[in-house]
Image: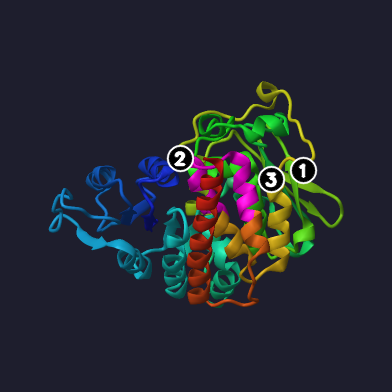
Amino acid sequence: MAKRKISIIGSTGSIGRQALEVLEKLQDKFEIIGLAGGSNIELLFEQAERFQPKYLCIGKPDKQTPDVRGKFDVLFGESGLEEICSNKENDIILVAVSGKIGLKPTLKAIENGIDIALANKETLVMAGDIVMKKAKENNVKVIPVDSEHCAIHQCIKDINQVEKLIITASGGPFLHKSVEDIKDATVEETLKHPRWNMGQKITVDSATLMNKGLEIIEAHHLFGFDYDKIEVVVHPQSIVHSAIEYKDGSVIAQLGVPSMHIPIQYAISYPERFEGIKSKSFSFSEIARLDFEKPDFEKFPFLNLAYNAGKQGGSATVVLNAANEEAVFAFLRGEIKLFDIYRITKNIYDSSEFIVEPSIDEILNIDEEIRQKTQALIKSYVTVQK
Ligand code: MN3
């Protein structure tokens, strides 16, 4: 069988690194066409030496960047990402960059008929309507890497018979802490996620449950379900990765140990399955118990805000995403408290006007405007606190 040709944009991030661990095991199944990394150039070169891609895209070259032209076809920055994603040699692109930088390259790949394994939430949160419409027009598969959506993707046989989607949430490090504890949470406490080892931004989002909020929006676009047909249930063990309920009341769930290797491998291999990196067989008796509970919407107000923004549609989710991200960065810099992330995001959200069907350029402009507006608000918070 011919090898499947793949490029990874964002190969030095958490998902990208784990994807290469998967691909190391599947060298007889895949050929790597392109790798693209951001600021971790040392790691990117290490990966390039090991996996020998045809194309190498360097996000932010500096004076220290060694000259590897001649060894690889070297591309740079955002235009380099778009070039890799326009290259029809690829059968599939793993979009593992974080943030809005994933949007345009993903669209390029879709326009060129290349399937997408999508690990970048912002692409759908910011422009889900446009992206999914284009994917349909170009007959392109968008396979989710996010573990919950990957689980739902695995459960669905006939989407027309599905009544609702049930997304599980681990609840993060503050699940059973009081509101008072959460208010004074340090960056360190917030970054201690009980189940998943991920990048910093998503780990903070998991602590506030904003990550789940973004995932509701992601699910709406990926599977075309109304928001009132998307339910969140807290499941601290993170063994049930999500579930669907069919019209007849039958529920199908996908289970597995919490490891991103599985959804990454599924997304790049679909519709096939390979043994790959699987280390041991799943054991119900070892797990012994699975707990479920309702999410606490008062303690985690981001959930409702995300449902509201999703139902509002258009640019509302762009505003939500940009304001939250800027506030999370300020929290990580120690400028604001954990609860301020919500306060600031809500303030920006409530004071913004939305447009119904924004174009990609409008989306990117709104994103930029909201970031500036949020940074200004953060400055005023910091001044007050001093
Ligand atoms: Mn997830």
Judged from the image, the secondary structure of the residue bearing numbered disc 2 is loop
Residue type beneath disc 2? Gly
Pointer 2 residue: 276
- Magenta residues, as a range? 324-345
Query: Mark 2 and 1 residues: CB-CB less than 8 Å, in contact?
Result: no
Pointer 1 residue: 298
Q: Earlier in the sequence, mark 1 or mark 3?
A: 3
Within 10 angstroms of label 3, few (less than 14), some, or many (20 or more) residues?
many
Pointer 3 residue: 242
Q: Is residue 46 above or below residue 60?
A: above
Left or right of 140, for residue 339: right
Within 10 angstroms of label 2, few (less than 14), some, or many (20 or more) residues?
some
Judged from the image, the secondary structure of the residue bearing numbered disc 1 is loop
Query: Mark 1 and 3 residues: CB-CB less than 8 Å, in contact?
Result: no
Q: Earlier in the sequence, mark 3 or mark 2?
A: 3
Judged from the image, the secondary structure of the residue bearing numbered disc 3 is strand
